C-alpha cells in the first residue's frame, strides 16, 4: 500500500489520548495481515483510557531482533483531520493538527516491514510497539512490559525534522507544587488576625529563581490559585504548580531540592504552613554516539545516501521511559515539523523514504 494513502487513511481515523480504540483496531488488522502476532496490554487502565498498547511480533527466519515504536494518540485538535498535499508537503485544512506526530511514524514502520517481508530475504524477529497516552504523559510507555521484546534497543519513530535526524538525548521533567496554608479572618473587621496565604505565595514566587536557569535547565510556574471565592476573607490557602526540565538529572534533582527549601525559607516567621511536592515525571537521557543503536542507524542512513544528523531533542517521549528502564532507545525523524500546531506539516521527500529507512534498519541487524 502506498505510504501517503495509508497516512491519509490513518489520520482520518479519530484518535486522542485515552481514546485510541479505533486506530488500534485498524492497526491490529493491518499487523495480523502482515503475519504479526498482536497483543494488547492494559495500559489504558493506568490513566483512564479505553485502549492498551499494541505489541506485535513476527518471528525471524534468521537470528537477531529489532524493535520499533510509535504512539497512537494525538494532541488536542486532532479530530476530523482532512489531510491535503501542498507544494511537496502534507498539511491539514488549517482547522486541526495534521497528526503526522505520530501517524507518520506508524506509517514508516508499516511500510518498512512490508518492504522487508516483500523482499523475501531472511529476516530477524520483528517487534513493534504502538503506544497509548503518550501525549498525555507517556502513559503507554510507562506501562509497557519491555521484557517481552528480544531486541537490544529500540527505534522510536516520533521526532520532528527531516529524514536523517536522530535524537540521542532529551531532557527530563520534574513536576513541582507548593501549597501555603494561612489563616482566614474577616477582611473588614479583623484582617490582622488572618495569615494571608496569597501574599506569602507571591513572595515565594517573586524570589524564586525560574525561567532559564542555565543552558540545559529551565523552570516555569504558570498555574496559580487560591481557596478564596470572595474578597471579604483574608486568603487562607494559595497554591502554585510548575515544572522544571533539564538534560542533566543531577541539575533537575538539585532544582527540586532548591525549590522545596526556598518555599519553606521564604515563609519562615509568617505563621503559615507550607507543603511542597517535587517528583521526576520522566528522566533525561543521552546516548553515546558509539552506542550500537546509533551505529546501526548511521549505517542504514548512509546506505540510503542520507547524511545522519545526531542531535538532542527538546521534549519528552517514550524513549525517555525506555532509556530509564535500561533499553537504549533512539528518536528517529520521519519528516514532520511544527507538530502540536495547526501549521504542522509533513515533508513528503522525507516521509516517502521513511519506510525505506525502517527496511534498511532491519537489514543492518544481525
Ligand atoms: Zn509524538
Image (cartoon, rainbow, N blue to C red):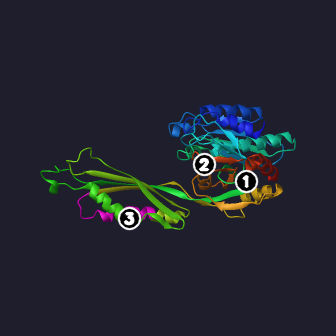
What is the magenta segment's predominant secondary structure? helix
Give neighbour class at mark 1: few <14, some 14-19, many 20+ (Cα, 10 Å). Answer: many
Neighbourhood count class around disc 3 (C-alpha, 10 Å): few under 14, some 14–19, many 20 upward: some
Q: Residue at x 55, y 43 (%)?
A: 75
Q: Local crowd at mark 2 within 10 Å, few (<14), some, or many (≥20)?
A: many
Taking the image as shown, residue 243 lies to the left or right of residue 344, namely left
User: What is the distance, in whole Å, between disc 3 and disc 2 at their CAs?
Assistant: 32 Å
Label 2: which secondary element = loop
Q: Residue 1's x, y, as percent?
A: 78, 36
Number of the front mark, 3 or 2:
2
Secondary structure under the numbered disc 3 in the rendered image? loop
Nearer to us: label 1 or label 3: 1
Pointer 1 or 2: first along the chain? 1
In the picture, measured across the screen, residue 277 lies left or right of residue 166, that is left
Residue 100: where, in percent of width, then height? 65, 44
Which labelled disc corresponds to residue 163? 1
Q: Which residue is mark 2?
A: 339
Based on the displayed image, in which of its 4 quarters is residue 94 positioned?
Answer: top right
Against 258, is 356 above or below?
A: above
The reply, left or right, for residue 334 in relation to residue 264 is: right
Return the disc, 3 or 2, that comes first in the chain's sequence.
3
Q: Earlier in the sequence, mark 1 or mark 3?
A: 1
Q: Can residue 8 be seen?
A: yes
* Residue 44 point in image, percent of width and height: 55, 37
* Residue indicated by mark 3: 208
Q: The magenta stretch spans which residues?
A: 255-272
Q: Is residue 291 left or right of residue 236?
A: right
Secondary structure category for the residue under label 1: loop
CB atoms of marks 1 and 3 within 8 Å: no
Q: Is residue 193 magenta?
A: no
Compute the Cα span from label 1 to label 3.
41 Å
Mark 2 CB near ligand 1 (8 Å cut):
yes
Amino acid at each position: 500500500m502506498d505510504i501517503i494513502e495509508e497516512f491519509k487513511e490513518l489520520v482520518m481515523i479519530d484518535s486522542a489520548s485515552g481514546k485510541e480504540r479505533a486506530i488500534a483496531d485498524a492497526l491490529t488488522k493491518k499487523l495480523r495481515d502482515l503475519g504479526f502476532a498482536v497483543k494488547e496490554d492494559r495500559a489504558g487502565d493506568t490513566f483512564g483510557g479505553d485502549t492498551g498498547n499494541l505489541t506485535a511480533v513476527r518471528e525471524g527466519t534468521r537470528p537477531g531482533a529489532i524493535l520499533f515504536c510509535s504512539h497512537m494518540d494525538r494532541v488536542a485538535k486532532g479530530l476530523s483531520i482532512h489531510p491535503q498535499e501542498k507544494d511537496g508537503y502534507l498539511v491539514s485544512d488549517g482547522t486541526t493538527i495534521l497528526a503526522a506526530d505520530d501517524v507518520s511514524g506508524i506509517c514508516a514502520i508499516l511500510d518498512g516491514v512490508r518492504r522487508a517481508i516483500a523482499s523475501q530475504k531472511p529476516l530477524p524477529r520483528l517487534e513493534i510497539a504502538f503506544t497509548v497516552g503518550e501525549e498525555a504523559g507517556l502513559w503507554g510507555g510507562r506501562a509497557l512490559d519491555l521484557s517481552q521484546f528480544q531486541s537490544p534497543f529500540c527505534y522510536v519513530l516520533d521526532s520532528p525534522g527531516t529524514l536523517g535526524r536522530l535524537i540521542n538525548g532529551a531532557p527530563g521533567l520534574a513536576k513541582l507544587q507548593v501549597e501555603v496554608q494561612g489563616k482566614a479572618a474577616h477582611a473588614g473587621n479583623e484582617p490582622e488576625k488572618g495569615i494571608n496565604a496569597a501574599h506569602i505565595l507571591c513572595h515565594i514566587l517573586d524570589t524564586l529563581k525560574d525561567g532559564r536557569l542555565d543552558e540545559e535547565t529551565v523552570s516555569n510556574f504558570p498555574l496559580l490559585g487560591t481557596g478564596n471565592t470572595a474578597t471579604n476573607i483574608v486568603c487562607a490557602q494559595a497554591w502554585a504548580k510548575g515544572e522544571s526540565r533539564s538534560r542533566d538529572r543531577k541539575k533537575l534533582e538539585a532544582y527540586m531540592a532548591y525549590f522545596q527549601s526556598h518555599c519553606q525559607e521564604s515563609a519562615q516567621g509568617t505563621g503559615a504552613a507550607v507543603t511542597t511536592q517535587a517528583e521526576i515525571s520522566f528522566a533525561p537521557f543521552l546516548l553515546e554516539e558509539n552506542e550500537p543503536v546509533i551505529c546501526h542507524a548511521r549505517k542504514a542512513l548512509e546506505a540510503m545516501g542520507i547524511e545522519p544528523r545526531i542531535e538532542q531533542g527538546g521534549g519528552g517521549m517514550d524513549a525517555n521511559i525506555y532509556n530509564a528502564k535500561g533499553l537504549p532507545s533512539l528518536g528517529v525523524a520521519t519528516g514532520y515539523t511544527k507538530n502540536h500546531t495547526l501549521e504542522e506539516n509533513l515533508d513528503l521527500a522525507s516521509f516517502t523514504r521513511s519506510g525505506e529507512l525502517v527496511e534498511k534498519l532491519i537489514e543492518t541487524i544481525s
